[in-house]
Amino acid sequence: MREPTERRLSDDEMAGWLPLIRTAQLLPQSLDRTLRERAGINHAHYVILITLAQDGDRFVTLSELARGAGLSRSRLSHALDALARRGWIERTSCSSDKRTQSAVLTDEGRRVVRGAAPAHVAQIRGLLGRLDAEERESLAALLSKLLPGIEEAL
């Protein structure tokens, strides 16, 4: 095995990096396709809706939602406009600070989440079902180690 250099990944590093980056590229596309075909919603919108659904009736600020959904404020704003036009969310000002925008799921938005969830859950279980319990634990541990570095870079 070659010594790692600054200009080239070692064979060992490359063996870990290539499947990771390929997964990172293909997974969102796969999730998006399944949700579009089976539930008529794209993955980015679904992530926003489930983030709001997880917070119950609490208003979620746009900053919190952008962080949770992994979107820029600009992309989030466009997505929220589309979701509001469909009647799935409502945008409002926070009661404590009128300058802070927030979003809440509507009853129709909850219906959409409930309708899309089975397809999403089935796809995730199909993917994770290829791993045994120990492998799923290892995957969670490994990704938990990588995630902070990725978030820091953003």
Image (spheres, rainbow, N blue to C red):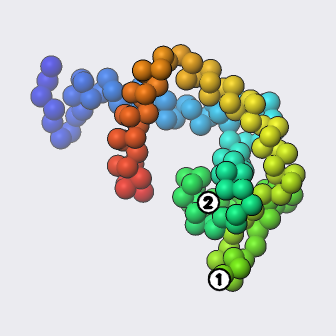
Let me know if residue 33 appears in the view: no
Residue 10 place in picture, x, y as percent: 21, 28
Residue type at the position of mark 2: Leu
Residue 24 or 101: which is nearer the viewer?
101
In the image, what residue occupies the spot 40% across and 41% down? 144
Q: Residues within 10 Å of mark 1 (few under 14, many from 20)?
A: few
Say whether disc 2 or disc 1 marks the residue closer to the N-terminus: 2
Looking at the figure, which quarter contains the C terminus?
A: bottom left
Q: Is residue 110 above or below residue 36?
A: below
Q: Residues within 10 Å of mark 2 (few under 14, many from 20)?
A: many
> Dot 1 corresponds to which residue?
97
Which quadrant holds residue 30? Answer: top right
Q: Secondary structure at mark 2?
A: helix
Residue 86 or 128: which is nearer the viewer?
128
Residue 30 or 94: which is nearer the viewer?
94
Q: Secondary structure at mark 1?
A: loop
> Dot 2 corresponds to which residue?
65
Residue type at the position of mark 1: Asp
The number of numbered badges drawn on the structure is 2
Residue 104 place in picture, x, y as percent: 75, 62
In the image, what residue occupies the spot 69% across and 25% down? 122
